[in-house]
Image: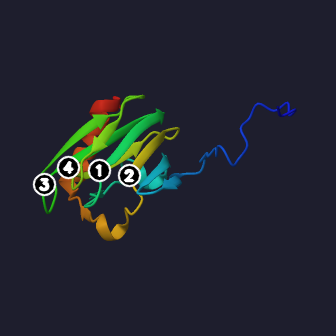
Amino acid sequence: MNSHHSTSAPAHLLSIHSHRQNGYKPMVDYGAWRVALLNYSPELDIMALDTMQRHNETNEVFVLLKGRCLLFIGNGTDSVDSIYAEDLRPGLLYNVRRGVWHTHTLSTEAQVLVVENRDTTYDNSPFTSLNQAQQKELVRLCRFAWGE
């Protein structure tokens, strides 16, 4: 029996991670998967969004931990034809399917858990530009969802 008075597990049994800076940060990579945290950053402000991304090799799962996140889904193959908005609710898993255009805006205090393939890179995750009308549609959808 160990005589230590600590109740915390030793580091070789359990690793604990946090991320308090702006933006995306991979936290745990294991085998084929990655868990990351996404915090608000200025490039995710609704007025700054001008592209959508898709992942050609993986689904991507989002879980809202705190704050607000509005996930935008774009329908279309080579470019975005129509845009949908999903106001993430805490405790639900949102699975963006492989090859689906998406982007998101976050409130300043937001934190989102992200799960994806470890080999997700810019090489297999192209971006598409949004035209001015599409950018205005993102703002309209955000104002509608968040009442701003």
Is 9 left or right of 34, judged from the image as shown? right
Tag 2 near tag 4, CB within 8 Å: no
Tag nearer the camera, 1 or 4? 1
SS of the residue under disc 2: strand
For the point 27% across and 51% down, which residue is it?
102
For the residues labelled 4 and 3, the Cα–Cα distance comes to 6 Å
Give the answer, above or below, for where 67 lies relative to 128. Answer: above
For the residues labelled 2 and 4, the Cα–Cα distance comes to 19 Å
For the point 61% across and 45% down, which residue is it?
18
Give the answer, above or below, for where 27 lies relative to 8. Answer: below
For the residues labelled 2 and 3, the Cα–Cα distance comes to 21 Å
Q: Residue flagged by tag 2: what amino acid is it?
A: Glu
Name the image quarter holding the C terminus: top left
Q: Classify residue 138 by image quadrant.
A: top left
Tag 2 near tag 3, CB within 8 Å: no
Residue ranking furthest to the front: 1
What residue sits right under mark 1 in the picture? 59
What residue sits right under mark 4 in the picture? 74
What residue sits right under mark 2 in the picture? 116
Q: Is residue 40 visible?
A: no
Dot 2 alpha-carbon crowd within 10 angstroms: few under 14, some 14 to 19, many 20 or more: many
Dot 3 alpha-carbon crowd within 10 angstroms: few under 14, some 14 to 19, many 20 or more: few
Tag 1 near tag 4, CB within 8 Å: no
What residue sits right under mark 3 in the picture? 76
Q: Residue flagged by tag 1: what amino acid is it?
A: Asn
Figure disc tally? 4
Tag 2 near tag 1, CB within 8 Å: yes
Q: Residue flagged by tag 3: what amino acid is it?
A: Gly
Is 60 left or right of 135, judged from the image as shown? right
For the residues labelled 2 and 1, the Cα–Cα distance comes to 6 Å
Tag nearer the camera, 2 or 4? 2
